[in-house]
Amino acid sequence: VDGKRGKNDIQLRDKYIESGKIPFDLAISMGLKSIATDPWLMVLQHMPGLLGFKLRQIFYKKRLGKMGKGAIIDPDVEISHPRNVYLDEFSYLARRTQIYCPEGYVRIGKRCHIGGWILGHGGVDIGHCVASGGTILSVTDSHQGGYRMSGPMIPRQQRNLRYGKVVIEDDAFIGQQSIIMPGVHIGEGAVIAPFSLVLRNVPAWTVVYGNPAIKLGMRDKVKFPVPH
């Protein structure tokens, strides 16, 4: 299954949460690797201009699950666990985009313009020609059952994580500062107005806004095919 974390990674995290200790040999090996790679990664991540774009294309071609032809990654983009991220042809990750995907996956189709923050734990499928400046969550903490909600520094048995794959179909538009919650399906061509909270599925070609998002109207269907 795409992007599932190994049992060793999960066990190491859980042991640290309980004891606060990291195995010494692991700390040494990771520290040496960091010294050798982090300065170069910092330069690569922040380098502006055409040279920066080209170097990031070369770098991520070997590290993403897929890096399509013509895809562009801006400076200051953060991608954790890039092997679980799939970026199709001529798509663009805008400055300060954050994709956090230690488990699950994020798939982005052709000719997309993606910003904001994406959590890929439960799976995120984004179609072609999608624009997004919002937050896309495929996992959240749930209070149901008396569990804590204060995040990853809480022991796993005290959390109730709600996973749900998010699907965003072709030509959808996700406005800035909007939030898509786990398990939501955004239909083809749907428009999510800025600052909206989307808790349930949105039908194709529907315009929604608000907190929680409600229907505002409809938009015309796109009359062009997806560019090659």
Image: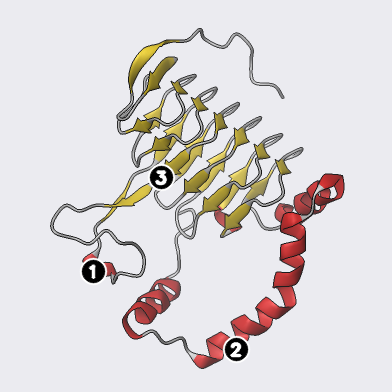
Q: For the C terminus, which image quadrant?
A: top right
Snapshot quadrant of residue 192:
top left
Q: As drawn, is 162 to the left or to the right of 47?
A: left
For residue 28, which numbered disc appears in the image?
2
| Residue at x 39%, y 46% (from the top left corner) | 138
Residue 120 percent across, percent down from the top left: 46, 49
| Residue at x 45%, y 20% (from the top left corner) | 190
Tags 3 and 2 in contact by the CB under 8 Å rule?
no
| Residue at x 62%, y 32% (from the top left corner) | 112
- Distance from the alpha carbon under mark 2 to that under mark 1: 30 Å
Q: Which residue is mark 1?
A: 157
Asked if residue 181 is positioned above or below residue 16 in the image, the reply reads above
- Distance from the alpha carbon under mark 1 to that under mark 3: 21 Å
Q: For the N terminus, which image quadrant?
A: bottom left
In front here: 151 or 121? 151
Q: Residue type at mark 2?
A: Ile
- Distance from the alpha carbon under mark 3 to that under mark 2: 34 Å
Q: Residue type at mark 3?
A: Leu
For residue 137, which numbered disc appears in the image?
3
Residue 9 percent across, percent down from the top left: 45, 73
